[in-house]
């Protein structure tokens, strides 16, 4: 009598094992999805950081030719002219958003692009295209192009005093992105009035 009423649960063993196995598979799938998602997100952020770092560390500007100073009076250089170009593979540089820092024994001046031209008294510096691709924006220095930069120190750059013979000057061109182009030059031993001199 007792044996007839006893339940036989042997048949549920396989079903329970299947349920537990499915639960493990579902949990593993969710966990792997979360881990893969986090991995893809981390990889994407790492790529962005590397790309930004390379952009900031690499310079898109390079000097092209000599730095020329003009002496309007004896033993004083008032105007500095130099040429810049885009490095091979460099990104375009917006010159309207570029700033230039000038330093000598008596000055440390930073100016944005601007001014009505050399000698006008308006603060800023000027650029003009020497080699410019037709149809491209004039303010963008792109691959294969060359631009002339003119700094009138006493007026447009508001320098306290003009650099004198044998004085060292430093010019830093700072684009909105990328490394700074630094030029350190020394004035010649003598400067005659109304003459042009390359400085090294």
Image: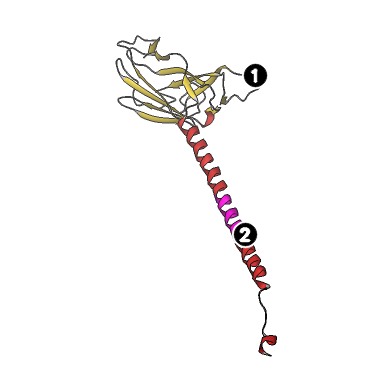
The answer to whether residue 176 is visible is: no
The C terminus sits in image quarter: top left
Distance (Cα) linking label 1 and label 2? 63 Å
Please name the predominant secondary structure of the magenta segment in the image: helix
Task: Give the x, y percent position of residue 191.
Answer: 33, 11
Residue in the foreground of this view, choosing between 159 and 97: 97
The N terminus sits in image quarter: bottom right
Q: Residue at x 56, y 21 (%)?
A: 143
Q: Quick one: SS at disc 1? A: loop
Task: Give the x, y percent position of residue 44.
Answer: 56, 43
Q: Is 199 colored magenta in this rendering?
A: no
Q: Residue at x 57, y 50 (%)?
A: 36
Range of residues picked out in magenta? 26-38
> Is 13 displayed left or right of 125 in the figure?
right
Q: Which residue is mark 2?
A: 25
The correct choice, above or below, for 7 with respect to 94 in the image is below
Name the front one of labels 1 and 2: 2
Q: Which residue is mark 1?
A: 134
Sequence-first disc among 1 and 2: 2
Residue in the foreground of this view, choosing between 77 and 48: 48
> Is 153 displayed left or right of 17 in the figure?
left
> Is 188 displayed left or right of 148 in the figure?
left
Task: Give the x, y percent position of residue 120.
Answer: 48, 23
The correct choice, above or below, for 155 with respect to 197 in the image is below
Badge 2, how many Cα within 10 Å: few under 14, some, many 20+? Answer: few
Quadrant position of residue 183: top left
How does the figure colour the protein chain or chains? secondary structure
Task: Give the x, y percent position of residue 83.
Answer: 48, 17
């Amino acid at each position: 009598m007792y044996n007839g009423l006893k339940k036989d649960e042997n048949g549920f063993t396989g079903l329970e094992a299947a349920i537990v196995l499915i639960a493990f598979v579902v949990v593993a799938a969710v966990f792997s999805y979360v881990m893969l998602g986090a991995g893809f997100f981390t990889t994407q952020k790492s790529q962005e950081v590397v790309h930004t770092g390379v952009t900031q560390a690499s310079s898109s500007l390079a000097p092209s030719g000599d730095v020329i100073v003009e002496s309007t009076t004896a033993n004083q250089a008032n105007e500095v002219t130099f040429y810049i170009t885009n490095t091979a593979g460099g990104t375009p540089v917006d010159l309207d958003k570029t700033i230039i820092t000038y330093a000598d024994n008596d000055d440390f001046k930073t100016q944005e692009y601007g001014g009505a031209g050399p000698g006008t008294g308006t603060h800023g510096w000027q650029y003009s295209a020497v080699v410019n691709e037709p149809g491209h924006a004039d303010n963008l220095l792109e691959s294969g192009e060359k631009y002339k930069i003119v700094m009138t120190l006493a007026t447009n750059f508001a320098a306290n005093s003009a650099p004198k013979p044998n004085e060292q000057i430093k010019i830093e061109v700072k684009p909105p992105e990328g490394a700074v182009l630094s030029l350190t030059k020394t004035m010649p031993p003598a400067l005659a009035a109304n003459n042009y001199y390359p400085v090294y």
